[in-house]
Image (cartoon, rainbow, N blue to C red):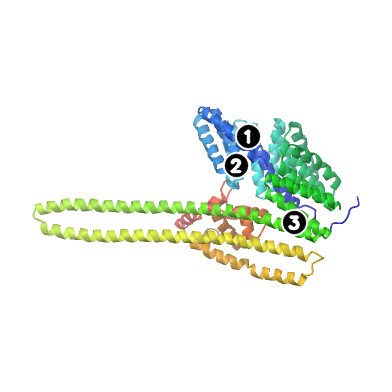
Amino acid sequence: MNHTKDTGISLRPNLRIISGIVLKQIAIIGLLGLSPFAAQGQRGEIDSLRQLLETEANDSAKVDILNDLGYAYSLVNSDTGLLYVEMALTLANEIGYQRGQAMAHNKKGVVYYTMAEDDLSLESQLTSLDISRKIADSTTMAKAYHGIGIIYDVRGDTEESLLYFKLANNIARRFNLDRVSATTSLSLGVGNWNLGNSDSAIYYTDQAIIVGKKIGFDAAWIAASKFLAKILVADEKYEEALLYLREPLARSMEIELNQQSADILLTQGQIYRFLGLYQRSREAFEQSISLAHLSGSLAEEQDAYDKLYALDTLQGRYDLALAHYVKAAALNDSIYNTENARQINELTASYEADKREREITLQQNQIDLLEKEKEIKRVWRNTLIGGIIMVLIGGSGLFIAQRQKIIERKKVVEAELENSNLKAKQLQTELDLKNKELTSYTINFIRKRELFENLQNQLTALRNDPSSEFDQEIHSISRLILENNNIDKDWEDFKMYFENVHKDFFTRLKQLHPTIGTAELRLCSLIKLNMNVKETAAILGISPDSVKTARYRLRKKLGLDGESSLSDYIINIDSSIQAYVGSS
């Protein structure tokens, strides 16, 4: 088919990025059994389950309700979800309810996944798999296999993830577990596409659509239809892609899945733009903005404004382009501010946890000091008694001398106690200040990196604009940004603040692992600060997928097995160093 050549930003999607987004949605659909856009609907279910919980005795039914509550809270409040799952596991262990134990570990893995604790999620799913195998619980077994596959995909090991997806899919089809079959088929479709197996990708994705429609599992077949349409776009089968989007759009509009509808309209608008149908493209983007706004999805709304800006630029409508660019930038700032507030809260929580640990240590020191005072009083009492006896037997001179020694010793101990208290208070103040400096510098580091990246991207877009009259000025500004975006200098500053709090961390890590490189040391420092994948990517200036690959390679270099937590190992590295020094 002939179509107008698009001279704007490339339409062809990065399917690796799209497949990552789809797998995230599959995790929510498959692991949680929910629409990825239905978190608010969980409130009603939570209220109902909590009412049931009040009437149940401590039996298997109560375990199931606690598990369901933890599940329902996964998209609302992960910490609360984890609390309910732990309660379910404790009760299941007490009454010997093995199926409840298997489900608790499975749901624990789900909660950890939503918290981006991939190592803990994998550990929980493996435990769930082990128990469900022993009791032949096919449903939990299939869910555990699927959860394990998703974690391996997050780590960048697509081939390994496909093995687990296939095992989950085989069990689901054998025992007619249609919901699990639909989600695992979609996971197989995405995984095969990532490995370049186009025919298998289309086959499994189509199976997900068929099964999802058969059982009315809207979230699954709509997500599968969207992914299949994007595969067709990548193969330049635009009319066929539009056909695959028509039914999911109508259904998502019917059941008011506004964020899903907004996403589908974004894809439609891109296809229309590539085909040269600019008016229809514009209408799709504008409708997407309205629905994204209704759903409260700032990311989709910003994406739609970005695409309108590109369309306006392509058509030479620079007044509209500027207006849409400003709106996209404003939404980006809003998203950034929300994310930044979350980062500050997380860093503050981490700081408060460290502070609590230091307070406990300080309290223990005070207890030790009180014990010393008690011992002094005991010695004083015993000596006094001994002195009285000595006086009674005529040794008054010796008693006076002994009493003077005790008084002098007491003064020395009291001076030591006072000095210890002053040092403890001074140490607490210094640690508080250093932690605040490290928290502030880390946040500023992230903001600076993102600011430079955004400025560079905008200048690159302007430089590629054939209508630009400021090539020389743009080149000068771009060079200035590159000169000031000195990552090595930034890392040296960061290292200084970091080692003020975590003294000799890098030196000690090199003692344990002499082959570890500079880039890996940087990654270890960010893991020590409990940074998630997105935050780490922003600081290192790489993609989230590259961070996951780097973490996977780091695990191998550190010699960690599949059951060991990378985060726990790095955070507790000081104790590892002590063990190392003690054995050498």
In the rendered structure, which amino acid carries the disc numbered 1?
A: Thr
Q: Residues within 10 Å of mark 3 (few under 14, many from 20)?
A: many
Q: Is residue 197 among the parts visible in the rendering?
A: no
Q: Earlier in the sequence, mark 2 or mark 3?
A: 2
Residue 425 relative to residue 76: left or right = left
Q: Earlier in the sequence, mark 1 or mark 3?
A: 1
Vertical position of residue 79 compared to residue 527: above or below: above
Q: List the residue tagged with mark 1.
A: 140
Q: Quadrant of residue 394?
A: bottom left
* Location of mark 2 (residue): 76
Residue 26, horizontal then vertical, whole percent: 69, 42
171 vs 22: above or below: above
The answer to whether residue 176 is seen in the rendering is: yes
Give the distance between the C-alpha atoms of the residues marked 1 and 2, in whole angstroms: 23 Å
C-alpha gap between disc 2 and disc 3 = 33 Å
Q: Is residue 357 left or right of residue 492?
A: left
Q: Residues within 10 Å of mark 1 (few under 14, many from 20)?
A: many
Relative side of 295 to 374, left or right? right
Q: Which of labels 1 and 3 is toward the front?
A: 3
Residue 199 position, x and y percent, is: 81, 44
Q: Which mark is residue 118?
A: none
Nearest to the observer: residue 553 or residue 60: 60
- The front one of 281 and 212 is 281
SS category of the residue bearing label 3: helix
